[in-house]
Amino acid sequence: MTAEAARLRIKTWVCATVVVLSSVFGNFFLKRGMPAALPTPLSYITALFQPWAALGVALLVLWMMSRMALLSWADLSYVLPVTSIGYVLVALLGRAFLHEQIGVKRWSGILLIVAGVALVSAATPPQTEQGPGHGADHGAQHAPDQAPERPA
């Protein structure tokens, strides 16, 4: 592995970690800060100014920006499965701190997510090669200079 490839791999893992943790804790704090009932549209806006909900929103803004950065250099088919480990962490936080009940079917689904993450992260490289499919002409079809001649 070249030094550049190693640097990109480390950068990808660090950014993926930020994506996962900001999503998990952003959603956790947003849930923790939301009141039990929001009877009017105005109450949704005022809920955003509750300290825990505001922290959650700030972390979700960080999540979106770090996810955009990660998607700018890493394959979508790699990023989505790897960052889905956040679903597992959300379930664990919900169970431990919000006292949510998680049944056997839900835990089974969580274990399937973990297995999928392990397969995807071990089987594919985390970055897209910069090549003909990238850049301003992404997806464009270039016509040949001349049409092929037809036999008479």
Image: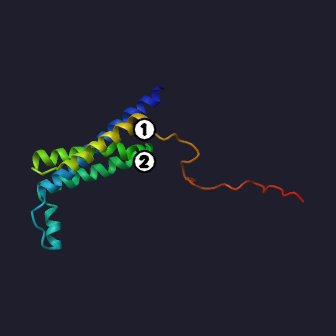
Disc on the earlier residue, 1 or 2: 2
The vertical placement of 5 against 67, above or below, is above
- Quadrant including the C terminus: bottom right
Front in this rendered view, residue 88 or 12: 88
The residue that appears at 14% across and 74% down in the rendered structure is 40
| Image spot of residue 112 (x, y percent) | 30, 44
State yes or no: discs 1 and 2 in contact (Cβ < 8 Å).
Answer: no
The vertical placement of 77 against 126, above or below, is below
Mark 2: secondary structure: helix
- Image check: 106 left or right of 19? left
**Res 76 label:** 2
The vertical placement of 119 against 43, above or below, is above
* Mark 1 neighbour class, 10 Å CA radius: few under 14, some 14 to 19, many 20 or more: many
Q: Amino acid at mark 2?
A: Leu
The residue sitting at the front extreme is 104
- Image check: 51 left or right of 5? left
On the question of residue 114 being in view, the answer is: yes
| Image spot of residue 25 (x, y percent) | 20, 47
The residue sitting at the bottom extreme is 40
Q: Amino acid at mark 1?
A: Pro
Q: Which residue is mark 1?
A: 126
Front in this rendered view, residue 152 or 110: 110
The number of callouts visible is 2
The residue that appears at 83% across and 56% down in the rendered structure is 149
On the question of residue 15 being in view, the answer is: no
The residue that appears at 32% across and 44% down in the rendered structure is 83
Mark 1: secondary structure: loop
| Image spot of residue 44 (x, y percent) | 17, 67
| Image spot of residue 96 (x, y percent) | 11, 44
Query: Real-space Cα distance between discs 1 and 2?
Result: 9 Å
The vertical placement of 120 against 51, above or below, is above
* Mark 2 neighbour class, 10 Å CA radius: few under 14, some 14 to 19, many 20 or more: some
